[in-house]
Image: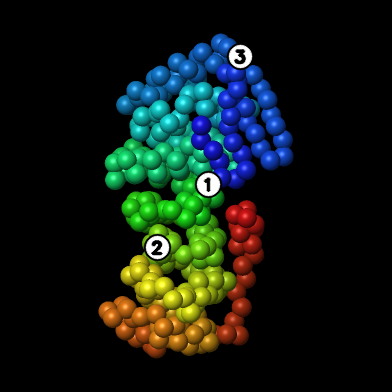
Amino acid sequence: MLLSSYGSEYVVSNGILFFCSNTELQLEEIDPRVKEMYEGVRDVLSKYRSGKVPKAFKIIPRLKNWEQILYITDPPSWSAAAMYMATRIFASNLKEKMAQRFYNLVLLPRIRDDIAEYKKINFHLFQAMRKALYKPGAFMKGFLLPLCESGNCTLREAIIVGAVIARNSIPMLHSSAAILKIAEMDYNGANSIFLRIFFDKKYALPYRVVDAVVFHFLRFERDRRELPVLWHQALLTFVQRYKGDVSSEQREALLRLLRHKSHPKITPEIRRELQSAKCRDEEATEPEPQLDEHMSTLD
């Protein structure tokens, strides 16, 4: 069974599916007739290619014990087309927190397994990720951030998921909160890919986010590792897009950073961008009333 990384898990005992959490243990035996019906749905979804899905499956988001019923259908056995349809249904009908659980427990493991096995992404699964962005907050908290926090996100995974982010519109506040979280994580090359993609979307980022990104790069000044090209590319994209949003003090700190971390082709361009930058007015303040709310939901 799939296990959540957030303190919850599904277990099977004597043919009964249980949902366990840190705070409570909920036990509910499924009616044998219901179980039999959804085992039939499971068989349909494992072979599904196109057309209508069973009505019994469409009503799952409205059920109180939707997670128990869902796992009777055995999500890992679904066809890629069925996963797309399921994501479409659940993204439209579940509340934000429930959609987040579906993305984390069902969609994310399937995407990673598919990429690991085939070295590319099935078209239907790619479209499923796009549909998942219908609820951007749930996508960030249930899919993107857990992927980054795993510490083993591959560059191939980052490029594929990054393509979904790059091609679709995402509200600025959701992206800002994600940038903050990624900037605080332990470094991984994949994180540089995601940061660069967010920078290229050219959001008007709050100064709080800009400051966090600057600190993200500055913390590598004393790092003895030889940083990959991806890191330098992310820094270049950041200064190209946001050089006018950094303070003069931050600009000088970034210029000092370049003395310790340099790339023969990329660093000279970064330096030119910083030296030509007209820094933000340090007296100015920027209200961020909604960002704190988004950050608290990511904790």
User: Depth check: 289 or 130 in front?
Assistant: 130
Residue with the mark numbered 2: 189
Residue with the mark numbered 1: 142
Spatial CA distance of label 2 from label 1 is 21 Å
* Placement of 60 over or under 119, stated as above or below: above
Circle nearer the N terminus (2, 3): 3
Q: Mark 2 or 1, which is nearer the eye?
A: 2
Residue with the mark numbered 3: 31
The furthest residue to the top:
33
Spatial CA distance of label 2 from label 3 is 48 Å
- Give residue 11's position: percent from left, percent from top: 58, 29
Quarter occupied by residue 260: bottom left
- Give residue 202's position: percent from left, percent from top: 42, 67
Quarter occupied by residue 34: top right
Query: Do residues under tags 2 and 1 come within 8 Å of each other at their CB atoms?
Result: no
* Local crowd size for mark 3, using a 10 Å CA cut-off: few (<14), some (14–19), many (≥20): few
